[in-house]
Image: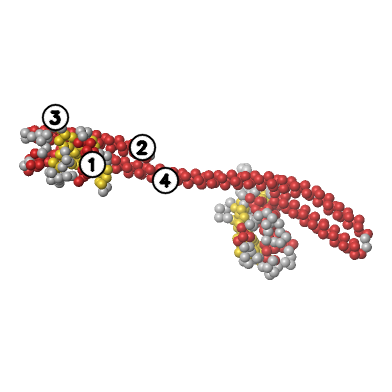
Amino acid sequence: MVILYVRFHRAQEQALADRLITLAGWARADLTLALERDGRDLEYLEWLEDAPEAQIDALQSRAQSFAEMNGLERLWVYDDNLRVLLDSAGEITPGQENPYAVLDAAWAEDALHGEAVATVSYNVEENPFQRAYIPIRSDDGEILGLLSVEGQRTYFEPMRRLRRLMFLISLMVSAALVVLAIVANRSLSRFLRLEETMNHRDRLQTLGTLAAGMAHEIRNPLGIIRVTVETLREETGSNDGGARADHDRLFSDVLEEVDRVHDLIGRFLTFARPGDDGGAEPAELATEIRHAVRLLQRAKAGQRAEIDVEIDDTIDGARTALPSASLQQVLFNLLINAQEATEARGQTTTIRVQAHRASNADSAILSVRDEGMGMTPAQLKRAGEPFRSTKPDGTGLGLSITKNLLASVQGTLEIASQPDEGTTVTVTLPLLPEKTPPRAGLE
C-alpha cells in the first residue's frame, strides 16, 4: 500500500512539474510578445528596474492575467543575481530578493546553467508549493535571468485526496489485520486447548480402560482370598477360648477389608462405565424421587436429619432419559451426601428436596439443600474429582459417578456451598417428550 502511494505521488508530482515547465515557457513567450509590441525585448531585463511605473503596471497586469488564465498562483522574472524584476502579485518591489527563492536555490542554480527545472512539492506551514524555473537567454545564448511560475493550491488537491484516501485505506487494512490477528490468535489458542483436551481425554480413556481391566481382574483373587480366609476360620474353630476369639477377630478384620476393597472396585467400575443399563426404560422423575426419599427415610430411621420434599405438579409423569437404576443411583448419592453432611453437625436439620420444570419446559430442575458443614472455596473447586472427598473414609467416586451419569444424557450438576451454612446441589436433567395417546379410529 505504501509503495503504491509513493509511486502514484511521484507520478502526480512529475506530471505537475512538466505542466509548470510548459506554462513557464508559454509565459516567457507571452511576455516577449507583449514587450515587442512596446519595442522592447526580454534581452534587456535591466530596463525593468528603471522602467516607468505605468509600463511596469501594464506588464504586471499582463503576467497576472496569464497566471489566472492558466491556473497559476504567481509568476516572477529574476535577473541573473536572483533579484526580482517582475512579480505578478505586486508584493515584491523590483530589485529586491524573493524570500521564498532561498528554498529553491538549488533548482534556480540549475536553471541559471541553462536547464528548465521544477522543484519537488513541499509544504511550508502546511501550505503546498511547487515551482518551475526556465532561463531567459539573449540572442547569442547568454543567460540573462530566470522566469518562474508557481502552481495553484488546487494543483495539490488530488495528492491531498490521495493521501487521505491512502491513509484511510491503510487504517482500515491495519484494523482488519489487527482483527484478523486477534481472531487467528484466539482460534489458534482454542485449537491448541482443544487438541490438549483431546489428547488428555485420550490418555484418560486409555488409562481408564486399563484401570478398569485391572480392577476387574483384581476381583478374582479377592474372591479366592475371601474363600480361603473363611475356610481357615472354620478349620481353626476347634481352638480353645481366647485363641479362638483372637483368630475370629483377625479373620473378621481380613474379611472386612476384602469386602471394602471389593466395594471400592465395584464403585470404580461403575465410574469407568456409567449408564450401561442395556436399553432399560426411561424413568419417571417424580416417582423415582419419592421412592428414593422413602427408602432413605426408612434406612435412616432415628437419624437427626429430616427430609422435606416439594415436587411441582408440572413434572408429574415427566420422564428422563436415565433408566430407573441410574436415576436412583444419582438420587441416592445426592441424598446420602446431604444426610452425612448434616449428621456431622450433631444437630437436627432438614434436607430440602425440590423439583420443578425449567422455564424452557424441556428439562427439570432438582435441588438438594442441606444445612451441614458446607465446603470451603478450595474444597468446592475440587468437588466431584475422583478420590477427592471431604469425608475421612470417602472415596469421592459417588459425586463423580453422578456427574458421569448426568453427562451421559446431557444433564448438568452445579454445587453452591458456604462453610457452616450448608450446600445446595442443583441438577438440570433433560426430559423426554411426553407420549401422545393414540387417537381413536373413525367408525
Query: Which mark sits nearer the N-terminus, 3 or 4?
Result: 3
Measuring 68% from the left and 44% from the top, which residue is drawn there?
A: 206
1 vs 4, front mark: 1
Q: Secondary structure at mark 2?
A: helix
1 vs 2, front mark: 1
Residue at which label 1 appears:
104
Q: CA distance from mark 1 to mark 4?
A: 40 Å
Q: CA distance from mark 3 to mark 2?
A: 46 Å
Q: Secondary structure at mark 1?
A: loop
Q: Position of residue 404 (x, y in %)?
A: 66, 51
Q: Position of residue 3 (x, y in %)?
A: 37, 38
Q: CA distance from mark 1 to mark 3?
A: 27 Å
Q: Position of residue 134 (x, y in %)?
A: 19, 35
Query: Which mark sits nearer the N-terminus, 1 or 3?
Result: 1
| Horizontal relation, residue 60 to residue 165: left or right | left
Question: Quarter of the image containing the C terminus?
Answer: top right
User: Which numbered marker is on residue 175?
Assistant: 4
Q: Hey, what amino acid is under mark 3?
A: Asp
User: Which numbered marker is on residue 4?
Assistant: 2
